Each structure stands twice: as structure tokens, then as C-alpha cells.
Image: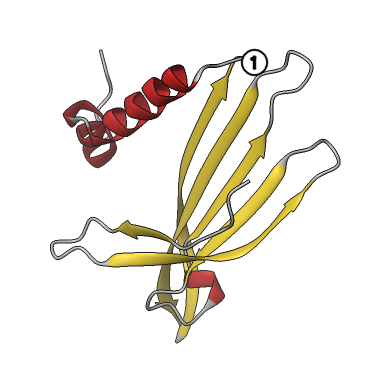
Amino acid sequence: MSAQANVILADGQGTPVNHTFEPNGSFANADGTIKSAWVDRTGASLDVARAVLREDHKPSAAGVREKIRTVIEIPIVETVNGVQVRTRLHVIDFEIRFDPGSLQAERDTVAAYAKNLAASTYFQAKVKTGERTW
């Protein structure tokens, strides 16, 4: 198992800023799922304003698919009556499942597809505009 390390993600602003998600702990559930979390402390002094990255990694066992789920929660904080409150929360939710016995080359292909889908014009336009596919 790899050790928890910082995860650095750039935002989508005109002048992108790198956000460092710092490790916030990792533990195993009774079912073997490893739960890990990272917190973005870049420029956010309030917990309510910090983006969080979470991962659930359930290893393959007894013919059950390995499952890796990564979620990023992006809060939007506004000042309401002089108090900063979270007014919206955006969520990115990726889930990848591998059949038992997956080979490294197959995992490499899945990783490449996931990376290339997220970077594709199709996916970027869908996220940015909300336009439906027809």
C-alpha cells in the first residue's frame, strides 16, 4: 500500500492556482475497504470552505471486483449577514471497478481511458456547459 502524500490539483481559473490537498488520515474498515482523505488548505481558513478529496479502495476478494472510488467535494462559501457560510457544494465522483485477476496492461488502459476522458473536449464541454448528449 502506498503512503498518503500530498495531491496537487490546479483549479480552472483564468490564472490557475495549484491546490495542495494534504493527507488527513487513512484507515481500514472491517470489510477491508481502505478509506483515505485529503484536505485543501490552500487559502481557506475555515473548515467549511475547504475542498476535500476522499477515496474508498476495496480490494478484490472471493471473486468480487476491486473498487476504487474517488470523490472531491468543492464548497462555495459566501458571506451572508456578515457570516461566511457554505451556500453550494459541487461533487466530483469517480468510480473504477476491476474484475478479479486484472492484468497490469489492462489497468494501464483503464487509467489512460479515465485520464483521457476527463481531458477530452466532450467531457470538458459537458461539465462546463451542462449540455446534454442527444
Residue type, label 1: Pro
Q: Position of residue 82 (x, y in %)?
A: 45, 87
Considering only vertical position in the picture, is 25 above or below 1? below
Q: Residue at x 48, y 22 (%)?
A: 104
Q: Which residue is mark 1?
A: 100
Considering only vertical position in the picture, is 10 above or below 45? above
Q: Residue at x 21, y 26 (%)?
A: 122
Q: Residue at x 64, y 42 (%)?
A: 56
At label 1, counting other C-alpha atoms closer than 10 Å, the crowd grade (few under 14, some 14-19, many 20 or more) is: some
- Please indicate whether residue 69 sits to the left or right of residue 15 in the image: right
Q: How many marks?
A: 1
Q: Residue furthest front?
A: 104
Q: Position of residue 84 (x, y in %)?
A: 47, 79
Q: Residue at x 57, y 51 (%)?
A: 54
**Location of residue 34 by image quarter:** top right
Q: Position of residue 110 (x, y in %)?
A: 41, 23
Q: Quadrant of the C terminus?
A: top left
Q: Position of residue 4 (x, y in %)?
A: 57, 58
